[in-house]
Image: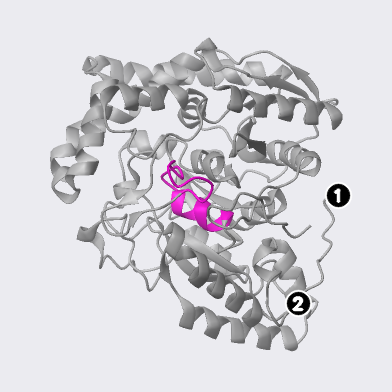
Amino acid sequence: MSNATILPEIDTQTSTDLWRMSALELAEAIRSRQASSREVIEAHLQRIEDVNPSVNAVTVVLAEQALEEANAADGAAAGGGELPPFHGVPFTVKENIDLDGTPTTHGLKALASAYPGQDAPAVERMRAAGAIPIGRTNLPDFAIGWHTDSELRGATVNPWDRTRTPGASSGGEAAALATGMTPLGLGNDTGASLRWPAQCCGISTLKPTLGRIPHATTVEPVDGPISSQLMGVQGPMARRVSDLRAAFEVMAGPTWRDPWTVPAPLRGPRPVEPVRVALVLDPAGQGIANQVQDGVRKAATALEDAGYVVDEVEPPSIDVAARMWLDILIPPVRAGWEIWAPLVRAYTEEFVLELFEVAGDPHPDMHMQSFVTRHSLLRAWGEFQESHPLIVAPISTDIPFEVGKDRTTPEVAAIVAGMRMALAVNVLGVPAVALPVGIGDGLPQAVQVIGPRYREDLCLDAAAALEDRLGIITPIDPGATEVLEAGS
């Protein structure tokens, strides 16, 4: 398979092909006048109408606004001249990211009318690149938890298996992408919230390096504790790696609105070839589901075929890094929980209290020491990635859990343990691309390709090589037993 864009023949009478296509394919179709932006928007709005009742992923549909913007985009295209990369292409936005004109609800009834004063930087940059927002997507209350069920919008359904979670907290985006309701989405990730839904729903996403893509909001709390600032990032979600790369290039870059952002180049120096990949089959040797490990092995074989050298070796102290996620994040949450608890329903509070139980009650000095340990581990991982720039590993070591199996202390502890590799990546602030590598037992198989800081380019290059050899597995119809043929 090639990375070149080859447009499928488009039947604009039924728009059947438009909702299956990637964001860049749609942009090229609009640019070449094979389809209008209005036809593209209408196809996705119709797809939302057809399938969203089955999955509850899209929470707000911006039909009138999107069609008006599509008409304007078509007018600009008719005028000739150079068009921006996503001209006339629809995208969706998670409900904890500011989109001017719609509330940033965080999934809470208390914030149902929390209208932002302006777009988040990532949204602003996507609009400047010509993209058109068509809807908002679901998340759990305050983005807390690994299953998408919000007080305000209800639960999102995994389109592969209704009995299992679609992941969280960007579960609405993942389910919308998997079912063809959007070609591109914006989400975020503090504890695998981009990558876990990607595994559950069979789509791709990029968790960038801390400081790559700015985060800013005008809805309180404007600034979170230092722990969430260090671990939370914004990122694109899509069905194609090429879309992730293009969206990343649009959204990345510094702004005064986010003091963490840095002007790092989008491409680093060429690595020594062949690039060596560290293959992690069972992080820290704590056990892994066969279905998940089989997917990791598929990725290893595909990368070897692409010319990478794959060694079965682990980066340092995965278990320590994963434990630090709890030690850094939980103490400030616990300290301020009495302020936020009244805003959430009992369902969410029960989960948070179980997470507190899993974290334990460490000595206050432990919280401060964890930042020192983090610094040491960053140095150790940096040295490791001198010889193995890329790490291929599972996202969660378990398949998507059954809905409702995240309510007790043992269940939450098992989820945290399964997420150990993903949480280590959050703690260290390094980039990772998550993508599907096949289907096993009726569910997507996925891996994350982890790179050194500010080397998203290396992650995306390897992910593209995997996609070329292993293909894509979405879009699908909710509950369908066969994968729909996607645009090639």
The amino acid sitting under disc 1 is: Ser
Of residues 465 and 220, the one nearer the viewer is 465
Of residues 409 and 342, the one nearer the viewer is 409
Q: Is residue 144 left or right of residue 240?
A: left
For disc 1, the neighbor class at 10 Å (few under 14, some 14 to 19, many from 20) is few
Mark number, residue 63 = none
Q: Can residue 307 be spotted in the picture?
A: no
Report the span colored magenta.
158-178
Which quarter of the rendering shows the C terminus? bottom right
Q: Is residue 151 left or right of residue 177?
A: left
Q: Where does label 1 land, which residue?
A: 2
Q: Can residue 240 be spotted in the picture?
A: yes
SS assignment at label 2: loop
Percent position of residue 467, x then y: 75, 43
Q: Is residue 305 left or right of residue 344?
A: right
Whether 150 is drawn above or below 371: the answer is: below
Q: Where does label 2 land, which residue?
A: 11
Measure the C-alpha gap from mark 2 to mark 1.
24 Å
Residue at x-position 32% and y-position 59%: 153
The amino acid sitting under disc 2 is: Asp
SS assignment at label 1: loop
Percent position of residue 433, x then y: 62, 39
Quadrant of the rendered structure where residue 389 is? top right
Percent position of residue 181, x then y: 55, 64
> Is residue 177 covered in magenta?
yes
